[in-house]
Amino acid sequence: MTLDEIKSLDVNQCNKFANFAKDKLPMPGKKKRLDEILNREIVVTDFRITKSKRKEGTDCLQIQFMLDNDVWVVFTGSAVLIDQIQSARDNMPFRGTLVKIDKYYSFS
């Protein structure tokens, strides 16, 4: 931007950093293990996909959800769950049950 453009800025029209940088903030909720919520209906309120810290070259899915009137988060590297939750992005929040089918986790 030029100096003239900067001086003519209406600061009230500028985006606030906190409104678009939410992905970097910790996701609120207490941590649960995936096996603790299997076969129980949860309300998925948000999710985030990042690079896995445990297994190089893979993704990690963090799911924020409601269960028993409390807010929780769970972490998984399940490619099936990652694909399913990405396709459900426009339907958030949603109710679902996590199940294990053979070696795979899935929403039902």
Image: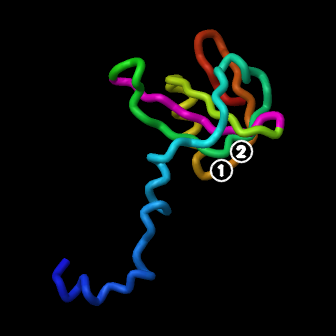
**Residue 100, position as x, y percentages in the image:** 67, 16
Please tell me the numbered disc located at residue 27. Answer: none
Color style of the picture:
rainbow
Whether residue 61 appears in magenta in the rendering, the answer is: yes
Quarter residue 32 falls in = top right
- In the shown orientation, is residue 1 left or right of residue 13? left
Q: Residues within 10 Å of mark 1 (few under 14, many from 20)?
A: few
The C terminus sits in image quarter: top right
Q: Secondary structure at mark 2?
A: strand
- In the shown orientation, is residue 18 left or right of residue 3? right
Quarter residue 46 falls in = top right
Residues under numbered marks 2 and 1 in contact, where contact means CB atoms less than 8 Å apart: yes
Please tell me the numbered disc located at residue 91. Answer: 1
Please tell me the numbered disc located at residue 94. Answer: 2
Point out the stretch of residues depicted in magenta.
Answer: 57-68
Q: Which residue is located at x 52 percent, y 42 percent?
A: 26
Q: Observer-nearest residue: 95 or 2?
A: 2
